[in-house]
Image (cartoon, grey):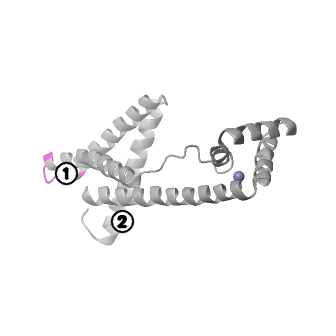
Amino acid sequence: MVAGAMSMAAGEYVSVQSQADAEQADIARETAELRDSLPAEEQELTQIYIDRGVEPATARSVALQLMAHDALGTHAREELGISDLTTARPLLAASTSAFAFVAGASAPVGLALTATQDSVIVFVSVGSIILLAILGALGAYTGGARIVRAALRVAFWGAAAMGFTAIIGRLAGAQL
Ligand SMILES: [Zn+2]
């Protein structure tokens, strides 16, 4: 549980921080371009709308109006695909991931604590797959997606992950 939570937190932190670094570099470059070569930037945005099927005159008019309103925000959205310029919070993302992992992992850990020595492998794997299916169904229900398909998908990939882990454990000669 601790190893998994730490690994999720570290991965999330690095991922969010790298994304934020890349976005900040893009925004800084875009800010400089808007300051130093405004006509080219106006033309660039106009061309983006023309490529999406807007008439050239209308495209130019839309580009100029949007840039008069919020030049950097418009270029960030249309050119870089950055929809909101809120600052990412890597530490918050990391701790959320760690807590989510602990919450999810406490179920199989609880199952292992209540099982007897002989039945622990079957008890934990079957119990975890059932719980995964319930979680998948719950997620699909919350998001309005198809429940049975989501439950089967989560259960299948959970079982596959457990199977691969068991095979690798056996090949390495370790009791997992
Ligand atoms: Zn631009």
Circle 2 is placed at which residue position? Answer: 168
Question: Residue 116 or 14: which is nearer the viewer?
Answer: 14
Span of residues in magenta: 114-121
**27 with respect to 164 (left or right):** right
Q: Residue at x 40, y 58 (%)?
A: 13
Tell me the element at label 1. helix
Q: Position of residue 51 (x, y in %)?
A: 80, 44
Q: Position of residue 69 (x, y in %)?
A: 67, 38
All told, the count of numbered labels is 2
Q: Position of residue 83 (x, y in %)?
A: 58, 43
Question: Residue 29 or 168: which is nearer the viewer?
Answer: 29
Position of residue 47 relative to residue 164, above or below, is above
Q: Is residue 87 magenta?
A: no
**32 with respect to 161 (left or right):** right
Q: Which mark is residue 120?
A: 1
Position of residue 13 relative to residue 158, above or below, is below
| Amino acid residing under circle 2 | Ile
Tell me the element at label 2. helix
Q: Residue at x 19, y 51 (%)?
A: 120
